[in-house]
Image (cartoon, rainbow, N blue to C red):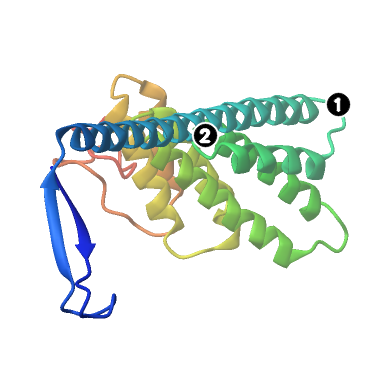
């Protein structure tokens, strides 16, 4: 290591460019400075690693707390829904909170959607129902069903629930509803082809369609139920 100092000549000012520089080699000073550098770097690295570990721990704790709170809210909502005279608005608030805290559970959306059906039925039974509110609930119903299939697309039960959710909005006469119902049943069947109930529900969907829809599958349709014999 070279240690250098500025040596000012007597005939120039201290700040002048004419100042001389004297240098000499100091092994002990070099070792001291290198060790000091390593110590400081190690300390900074340790502090950085500790901060990362602390941040990860805090995120994990927060996530676990949110999951627990979401499950608690969901269970509370289901219990409220199973009462003899449930308050559907209260149930909706509990299930909404569960979804907000943990939006990765498909059952939360399915329960929320089922409660929306109850809310809409209760509102429709009034002498002067709020049609706009019913329509908004039905839109939320479909979104809930779609979200459940997005989270767990391989579960036949989610596609079955979506088909039934679409079935509930048929009275609104929204274009494309019959096609959406049939598509959802087909996707449920694709994931559980050995379930005869799904095939029956698909056949009913074709039969109940407000307009003729080409059946899935190839070949004749001997009983004219809208479902090809190859599928039956």
Query: In the picture provided, is 102 more to the left or to the right than 39?
Result: right
Q: Which mark is residue 84?
A: 1
Q: Earlier in the sequence, mark 2 or mark 1?
A: 2
Question: Which residue is denoted by mark 2 in the rendering?
Answer: 59
Pick whichever, 200 or 21, lies toward us: 21
Q: Residues within 10 Å of mark 1 (few under 14, many from 20)?
A: few
Q: Residue at x 43, y 53 (%)?
A: 178
The picture quadrant where one finds residue 96 is: top right
Q: Quadrant of the C terminus?
A: top left
Taking the image as shown, residue 170 lies to the left or right of residue 124, namely left
Mark nearer the viewer, 2 or 1: 2
Is label 2 in contact with label 1 (beta carbons under 8 Å)?
no
Tell me the tag on residue 95.
none
In the image, 142: left or right of 187?
right
Against 92, residue 58 (above or below) is above
Real-space CA distance between mark 2 and mark 1, rounded to the nearest whole angstrom: 40 Å
Residue that sits furthest to the top in the current view: 194
Q: Which image quarter: residue 114? A: top right
Q: How many marks?
A: 2
* Residue 165 makes an appearance in the image: yes
Residue shown at 38% from the left, 38% from the top: 185
Q: Is residue 198 above or below residue 143?
A: above
Q: Residues within 10 Å of mark 2 (few under 14, many from 20)?
A: few
């Amino acid at each position: 290591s070279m240690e250098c100092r500025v040596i000012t000549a007597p005939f120039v000012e201290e700040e002048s460019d004419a100042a001389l520089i004297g240098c000499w080699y100091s092994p002990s000073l070099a070792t001291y400075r290198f060790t000091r550098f390593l110590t400081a770097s190690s300390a900074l690295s340790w502090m950085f690693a500790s901060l990362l570990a602390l941040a990860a721990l805090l995120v994990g704790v927060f996530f676990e707390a949110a999951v627990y709170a979401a499950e608690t809210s969901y269970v509370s909502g289901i219990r409220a829904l199973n009462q003899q005279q449930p308050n559907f608005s209260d149930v909706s608030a509990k299930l909404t909170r569960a979804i907000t805290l943990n939006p990765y559970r498909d059952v939360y959306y399915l329960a929320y959607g089922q409660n929306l059906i109850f809310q809409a039925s209760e509102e429709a039974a009034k002498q002067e129902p709020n049609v706009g509110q019913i329509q908004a609930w039905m839109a939320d119903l479909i979104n809930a069903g779609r979200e459940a299939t997005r989270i767990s697309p391989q579960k036949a039960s989610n596609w079955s629930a979506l088909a039934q959710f679409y079935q509930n909005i048929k009275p609104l006469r929204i274009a494309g509803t019959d096609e959406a119902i049939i598509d959802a049943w087909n996707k449920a069947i694709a994931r559980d082809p050995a379930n005869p109930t799904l095939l029956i529900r698909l056949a009913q969907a074709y039969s109940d369609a407000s307009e003729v829809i080409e059946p899935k599958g190839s070949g004749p349709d001997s009983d004219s139920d809208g479902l090809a014999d190859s599928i039956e």
